[in-house]
Image (cartoon, rainbow, N blue to C red):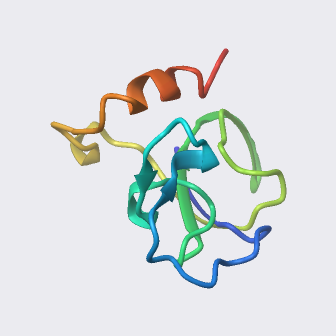
Amino acid sequence: MEVLFLFDQLPERDDYREPRPYRGRSDLPPVGVFADRGPRRPNRIGVTCCAVESVQGRELTVVGLDAVSGTPVVDLKPVMVEFQAVDVKQPAWVGPLMAEYFKP
């Protein structure tokens, strides 16, 4: 399941033009706001994927949602292979960082 949601719990920045260290980590290179998946964004919209564990009426129970409990959800979409990105290119430092992101 793909979940679109609103980052509603952090104040906005005054200026988004200056690159900043990724996730505030000084050991990582500075990146622009659209190269970062963090919550401080000019459009305040987040997107993540998770698995649906159960459905009871209008209530979904999900696993692996990368959002704070109570975050406003804008929309839900099924994940389809045909819509997934192909030939994704990312900096070499991202792979090792993300390997530690979700631990079972």
Decide if residue 65 is on the left or right side of residue 42: right
Going by the picture, which residue comes out furthest to the left? 87
Q: Residue at x 58, y 21 (%)?
A: 100
Q: Residue at x 61, y 25 (%)?
A: 102
Q: Is residue 33 above or below residue 37?
A: below
Question: 94 or 8: which is nearer to us?
Answer: 94
Q: Is residue 20 above or below residue 80?
A: below
Q: Residue at x 52, y 51 (%)?
A: 21
Image quadrant assignment for residue 80:
top left
Location of residue 78 in the rendering, given as x and y in whole percent from the top left corner:
45, 48
Q: Is residue 94 above or below residue 69?
A: above
Question: 76 or 54: which is nearer to us?
Answer: 76
Decide if residue 16 is on the left or right side of residue 104: left
Decide if residue 95 is on the left or right side of residue 61: left
Location of residue 94 in the rendering, given as x and y in whole percent from the top left corner:
41, 32
Location of residue 40 in the rendering, given as x and y in whole percent from the top left corner:
62, 67
Question: 99 or 73: which is nearer to us?
Answer: 99
Asked if one can make out residue 56 in the rendered structure from this viewpoint, the answer is: yes
Location of residue 6 in the rendering, given as x and y in whole percent from the top left corner:
65, 69
Q: Residue at x 84, y 59 (%)?
A: 70
